[in-house]
């Protein structure tokens, strides 16, 4: 039987906090239950916000928690060409179009909101003529590239995927993906030839990931991932969405909201066992 492969894929734009510890511990726990291997992946496509010192800290904090992984660690910022190739494949299928809208344009024209609560892109630039596209590209207008989600779903037909949950011991259930609710998502951003959605799908496939363990905050985004997997002809992993740790304000923990980092807790004398107890995941 093929080996089960899992991954923990943090973005090094800050120090890990208890929410990340929960995600990492769930991933290694799932690997243990599935007799699989957990990999570390560094999701640093946002080269402005991600810093090598945070990557180093992630590695140290995970080792402190007692987790390890096979080398080499996949680092997304080393793979921009590979993501651009995947985008080109979608472009050759006529599923990618240039969008010149600014944030303000989108906010003004938005047609409701996406599952994350962001303004839903109304598809303005989908209707530009080829001549206009060429002219604006040649002029060097800031551009991002969007998936024509409707054309893409017409091509794939109905999409389903398997979810294990709420606990890791539950049987997988089949779920429908509904990418249409995201509208035409950006696959190549203005500042980079990729996006979270595109890179995560390309890399899950490249690493042979069989089971994706991620927080419930990324549950809805999985719709887009399942669509991209089908378009790119790669297999869809099984998903498990774990609970989120909430702060006193009822919102998910975040460095930006002052949630203590694992290193802060460690400096206060916490042990890895204290972390496990706090997040409720045991070997
Ligand atoms: N890099 C993403 C994050 O830090 C998680 C990746 C994923 O599970 O898709 O939220």
Image (tube, helix red, strand yellow):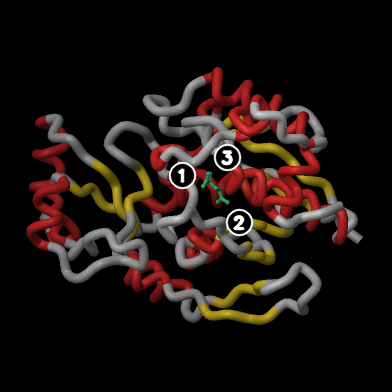
SS class, disc 1: loop
Q: Count residues near mark 1 (Cα–Cα under 10 Å), then give few for <14, some for 14-19, many for 20+.
A: many
- Name which quarter of the figure residue 29 lies in: bottom right
Query: Of the numbered discs in the image, which one, if any, rests on residue 41?
Result: none
Q: For the residue with label 2, is its CB less than 8 Å from the closest atom of ligand 1?
A: yes
- Residue 17: x and y in percent read 57, 40
Question: Where does label 2 land, which residue?
Answer: 214
Question: Where does label 1 land, which residue?
Answer: 254
Q: Is residue 84 visible?
A: no
- Residue 108: x and y in percent read 8, 58
For the residues labelled 1 and 2, say whether their Cβ atoms are less than 8 Å apart.
Answer: no
Q: Count residues near mark 2 (Cα–Cα under 10 Å), then give few for <14, some for 14-19, many for 20+.
A: many
- Name which quarter of the figure residue 242 lies in: bottom right
Q: Is residue 16 above or below residue 174?
A: above
| Real-space CA distance between mark 1 and mark 2, rounded to the nearest whole angstrom | 16 Å
User: Which residue appears at 48% of the width and 73% of the height?
Assistant: 156
For the residues labelled 3 and 1, say whether their Cβ atoms are less than 8 Å apart.
Answer: yes
Question: Where does label 3 land, which residue?
Answer: 17
| Real-space CA distance between mark 3 and mark 2, rounded to the nearest whole angstrom | 15 Å
> Quick check: 41 left or right of 129?
right
User: Which residue appears at 79% of the width and 57% of the height?
Assistant: 30
Most distant residue in the front direction: 268
User: Which residue appears at 52% of the width and 65% of the height?
Assistant: 219
């Amino acid at each position: 039987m093929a080996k089960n492969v899992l991954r923990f894929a943090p973005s090094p734009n800050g120090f890990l906090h208890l929410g990340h510890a929960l995600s990492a511990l769930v991933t290694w726990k799932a690997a243990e239950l599935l007799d699989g291997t957990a990999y570390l992946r560094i999701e640093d496509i946002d080269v402005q916000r991600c810093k090598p010192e945070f990557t180093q800290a992630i590695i140290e904090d995970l080792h402190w928690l007692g987790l390890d992984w096979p080398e080499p660690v996949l680092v997304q910022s080393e793979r921009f060409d590979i993501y651009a190739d995947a985008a080109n494949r979608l472009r050759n299928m006529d599923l990618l179009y240039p969008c010149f809208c600014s944030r303000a344009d989108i906010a003004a024209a938005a047609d409701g909101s996406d599952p994350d609560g962001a303004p839903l892109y109304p598809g303005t630039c989908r209707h530009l003529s080829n001549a206009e596209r060429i002219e604006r590209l040649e002029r060097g207008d800031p551009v991002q590239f969007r998936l024509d989600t409707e054309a893409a779903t017409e091509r794939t037909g109905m999409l389903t995927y398997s979810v294990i949950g709420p606990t890791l011991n539950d049987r997988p259930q089949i779920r429908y993906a509904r990418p249409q609710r995201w509208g035409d998502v950006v696959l190549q951003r203005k500042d980079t030839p990729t996006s979270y959605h595109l890179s995560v799908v390309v890399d899950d496939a490249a690493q042979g990931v069989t089971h994706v363990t991620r927080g419930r905050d990324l549950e809805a985004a999985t719709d887009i991932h399942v669509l991209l997997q089908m378009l790119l002809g790669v297999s869809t992993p099984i998903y498990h969405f774990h609970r989120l740790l909430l702060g006193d304000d009822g919102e998910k923990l975040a460095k930006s909201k002052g949630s203590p980092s694992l290193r802060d807790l460690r400096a206060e004398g916490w042990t890895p066992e204290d972390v496990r107890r706090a997040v409720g995941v045991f070997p």
